[in-house]
Structure formats: structure tokens, C-alpha cells
Amino acid sequence: MLGKNRQWIRIRAICLCWVLIISGLGLSSCSNRLQTSQLFDQKERVNKTAPASKLFEVDPPEVIQQLRRGLERYSPQVAILSPKNDEVLKDTNVNVRVDVTNLPVFKDEKLKLGPHINLILDDRLISEIYNIYKPISLENLSKGTHTLRIFASTPWGESFKNEGAYAQINFSIQKKTDDKVPDLSKPLLTYNSPQGEYGAEPIALDFYLSNNISGDKAKIADYQIRVNLDNDSFIIDSWQPFYLKGFSQGKHSVELELVDSEGKSVNNVFNKVVKEFTYQPNGQDSLSKILRGEISAEVAGTIVDPNYQPPQPPPAVPSTIDTTPAKSTSTDKEKETSEPTEKTTPETTKPKSTTKLEETESSPKIEAEKTDLSKPASEETLETSEETKETSQETDSAELEKSKEAEKTEKN
């Protein structure tokens, strides 16, 4: 009996050892996960435990940092004018009107970028609004309650974080439901980027937090964002855009979830969002060129200020023409070949000079011949003139005789 007890004690001791070993491994893995979640306290804030990961955080591009200064004086205030909060509509087509103050909303004609308003219906980005005076039409909406959210955005896609830069309402089509209605007593996550297609790195990861915590740093510090980006998992512990590099070409998947300081999910509608985006390098759109530094802040100033005039290039100075003869670089062989041409030139020109001399010498003879021929003509003209004089005298004498005879007849 005692032997059996000793064997049982040994078995229990062995089992206890295995339990301690397994629990030690579990604590070690938890410690690793904790370190991974705290990587955003360092410069590189991406989980490096995944061997395939190449993502790392970088500072915003220099051009964007300069352009940010042009928007620092603005504190946009946005509002949804229609539909009204808690309004029940019969028509499935709805016109949305928004209002914005303390921010110019426009799109630069050349670069196709500018401060704008993002409009989100439930969990989908519907439109980027650059003209607040034109209503946005939402068509064929499903029956039930919907959540409409808007927030002000920079030309390069960062959400403004000030109090009042975000607004939300709920409206219903034909009837009210509860499945898409956020709890206003709990923080709400609104996903911003990345989404769509990008043609350059770095790519910004951005979001907005609302419901009694926006603008309150003390309350924001109680919450974090858990991120799953492809094969990477990490925690964001501050409310600001994060620029990431190292993306492979093609499609990517990203999941954002709002959690508390202990890592527990904050249960509210839309607080866990999954989006896809595409990265195609060498994009030729304006944003891609700005991210790569191909468009300077001086040129891109037109996307933050509608009255900005980019600096004009200085007038071109006319280039001076050097009239000094160029030094001869011909070789001795070229000089030898050029000498015969110089000798042949006078020989070819000699006949031309002799003909000119012959022509000038012959010209007096021709004039003499012409004058000789002109002499008889002058003599003939003299003879004709004398004959005309004689005939005129004869006619005059005849007329006198006739007049005398006429006088005699009148006397008789």
C-alpha cells in the first residue's frame, strides 16, 4: 500500500512539473504578444515576429509636412442639413446636404486635389464632397435605419481631429431598426484610410474617434486601435495618422478594431472594420507624385489655398552669341587637302574677270556706232524743217494775194 502511495506521489510530481513547464511557455508567449502590442512606442511600430513582414513606419513625406502648415489655421466645423436626425422617409432615394465653416472646400483644377468632406453611409465611403452647395443623391436605400457620418479631410486624405470636424445622424427608410444605430454613450470608430488604390508609398493609416471623446486627450488615452494588416498585428496607442512603407504590389486587407486600455473590444456598431486597398507602384496621379516628392510644396500650395499663386519662373535671359572665330582644329592632312581648293579658285574666276573687262572695253565702240548712225537722221530732219518753212511762206503769200483781190472787188 505504501509503495502504491509513493508511485502516486511520483506521478503527481511529474504531472506538476509538466504543468509548470506548459504554463511557463504560455507566459513566455503572452510576454511576446505584449511586446508586440507595445512596438508603437518605438520608431518601427509593426509586428516583427511575422517573418514575411516588411512594413515599417516612417515620417510623413516632407512635402506633406510643409503643406500641413497651410491648414493649421483652420478648425473646420461640419453639419448635416438633410436629412434630419431620426427622420423617417418614405422614398428610398435621399438627397444629402452638408454645411462646412472655417475651411475652404474646393478642388484644384490642375492637381485634382483639395480640402473636402468624406461622406460615409453605414460603413461605406460614398463620396468625397468638394462642392457643399450641390446635394449628394443616395439611391435605392434598403428599408430600416441608417447611420450617416461626415468628417473634414485634408487634400491628401488625413481626417481633421479637432472638435466639430465630425458629424453623424440616423435616419430611417419607411421603418426604424436597431442593427445600424451606434450607442452614443460609447466611443465610436470611423475608418478613413487606406482604401481604394495607391500609386506610391508611404500609405497613411487614419481614423476618427467620436462620441464624447473627440478632442479629449485624457479619454482618448483610455482606448487603443488593434490593427491586422495582411500578416502583421499591432496596436496604435495615439490618435494620429501613421505612414507605412514596405507594401508589396497588389491587393491588401486591413482590419481596425477599437479596444480599451486592457485590450478588450469596445462593443459598438462599426467599431470593427475590415477594408481592402490596392498598391500599384509608379502611379501618375498628383497624390502619388506628392508622396514621391516629384511635386514640390511651392507648386502644390494650390491644393490648400484657393488664392495661392505659385512662384513664377524667372524670365529667360537671351544667350550671347560668341562672334570670335573658332580655332582651327583641322589636322595637317586636312590643310593639305584644303590647299588645292584655294589654288583652283582663282583659276576658275579668271575667265569671269576677263569677260567683264572685254565687255567694258567694247561698250565705247558700240556707243560710237550708235552716234554715227544717228547723224543721217539729224540731216533729214533739218531738210524737212526747211521744206515746211518754204511751204508755209507760199501759203502765206497766196492768202495775201487773195485778200488784196477781195478788197478790189469790194471797191468796184
Image (tube, rainbow, N blue to C red):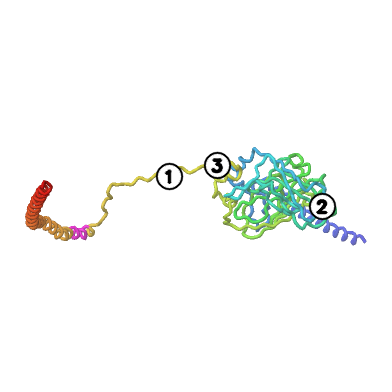
Disc 1 marks a residue whose amino acid type is Ala
Q: Which mark is residue 2?
A: none
Q: Which mark is residue 89?
A: 2
In screen coordinates, is 381 left or right of 321?
Answer: left
Q: Position of residue 351 (x, y in %)?
A: 14, 60
Labels 1 and 3: the sequence-earlier one: 3
In screen coordinates, is 83 left or right of 348?
Answer: right
Give whichever of 260, 159 is nearer the camera.
159
Magenta run includes residue 355:
no
> Which is closer to the viewer, label 2 or label 3?
2
**Magenta span:** 335-342
Disc 3 marks a residue whose amino acid type is Gln
Under circle 3, the secondary element is loop
Residue identified by numbered label 1: 316
Residue at position x 64%, y 46% in the image: 106
Callout 3 environment at 10 Å: few (<14), some (14 to 19), or many (20+)? Answer: few
Callout 2 environment at 10 Å: few (<14), some (14 to 19), or many (20+)? Answer: some
Residue at position x 62%, y 58% in the image: 248
Magenta run includes residue 340:
yes
Residue identified by numbered label 3: 309
Task: Tell me the CA gap for discs 2 and 3.
Answer: 46 Å
Callout 1 environment at 10 Å: few (<14), some (14 to 19), or many (20+)? Answer: few
Q: Position of residue 256 (x, y in %)?
A: 73, 52
Task: Tell me the CA gap for discs 2 and 1.
Answer: 64 Å
Q: Position of residue 109 (x, y in %)?
A: 59, 49
Disc 2 marks a residue whose amino acid type is Leu
Under circle 1, the secondary element is loop
Give whichever of 28, 341 is nearer the camera.
341
